[in-house]
Image (cartoon, rainbow, N blue to C red):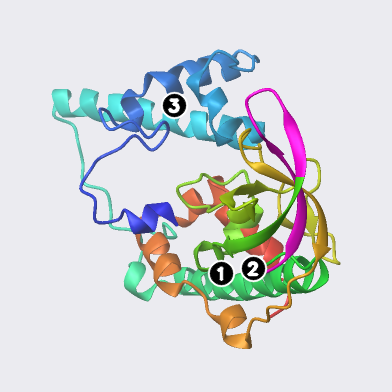
Amino acid sequence: MRAFDNKDTKTNTCSYCRSEDHHAPDCEIAKYDWFEWSNHRVPFQSESWYTWKRNDYTQWIRAAQKVAVMRDRAEERKAKKKAGTTTRAKPKCGFCGESGHNRKNCEKMTEVIEAAKRANANWKRSLYETFVKSMGICEGAAVKVEYRENYSSKVEGIGLITSVNWSDLNFLTSNKSIDTDLRTQIKIKVNVNGKTQDMNLKYDNSIRSDQGRVIIPTEYSYWRAAELREVIGKSTKEFDEEWITTAPEDEFTWLTKKRSYEWLRENGVISAITEWDWKK
């Protein structure tokens, strides 16, 4: 996940808009979004409209409301500090919010990490069984695609899939409401007429497991990428069990150390775990 890969980058960013010149309580975009939502209007004119937020109004509202609460609390702290009435709060666990322990011995944090590992294994098994074995989409597959010869015209061609970013993917890929700092989209390269280019899946067709769970959601297509029309020669590549059961444990552990349970819930991570932690 991008947030984990950039963990050593010493930049402070707004948790709402990702700008590096302010923090969330000072975010004018968040302030505008909450003003619109709180007045029962969709903030179409907001810069947030061009991010993941427009895919899930519920999460968008919660995110904007959370920053509004942060802004109110920041103002309260400033007022108390100015009046000299600040008091030190009792220490609580940074993950679950309960008193009497910290993250190091938080049982809920351990449970979330273990559940994420199970969810990841279930998702990867479904990805392999459905996407690779059944549909045949993997390195070496022959595919019919539609691609652009120029700005105005599209043609069909036959190509070979050359790469898929398997090592970057985890179960969060399945939920496009999750911020792209945490969620990595699937990236497929195809060689058509000696030229390697990105390949999009069909926009109106989510990849689902036999149980109906979304494995790979529909994505907004990059207009210059080739678009899959048909698999005409399935890949015969096989993945071993180790690939399925190996989880990016460092990423999950880092995430629970840096974020609270409430933050993970509000940002869709807990719901993604619940969705895929169906087989213990």
Asked whether residue 101 appears in the rendered view, the answer is no
Q: Which residues are magenta?
A: 139-156
Q: Position of residue 268 (x, y in %)?
A: 58, 49
Q: Quadrant of residue 154?
A: top right
Q: Quadrant of residue 225?
A: top right
Q: Position of residue 87 (x, y in %)?
A: 21, 41
Q: Which mark lies nearer to you, 2 or 3?
A: 2
Is 223 rendered above or below residue 90?
A: above
Residue type marked 3: Ala
Residue type marked 1: Ala
Image point 33% across, 73% down: which residue? Answer: 104
Residue occupied by mark 1 = 116
Q: Quadrant of the C terminus?
A: bottom right
- Which structural element holds mark 3? helix
**Does residue 146 show up magenta in the picture?**
yes
Residue nearer the viewer, 62 or 210: 210
Residue occupied by mark 3 = 68
Residue nearer the viewer, 271 or 165: 165
> Which numbered tag is attached to residue 241?
none
Residue occupied by mark 2 = 139
- Which structural element holds mark 2? loop
Image point 48% across, 56% down: which residue? Answer: 261
First in sequence, mark 2 or 3: give its number.
3
Asked whether residue 116 appears in the rendered view, the answer is yes
Near mark 3 (Cα within 10 A), the count class, few <14, some 14-19 or many ≥20, is many
Residue type marked 2: Glu
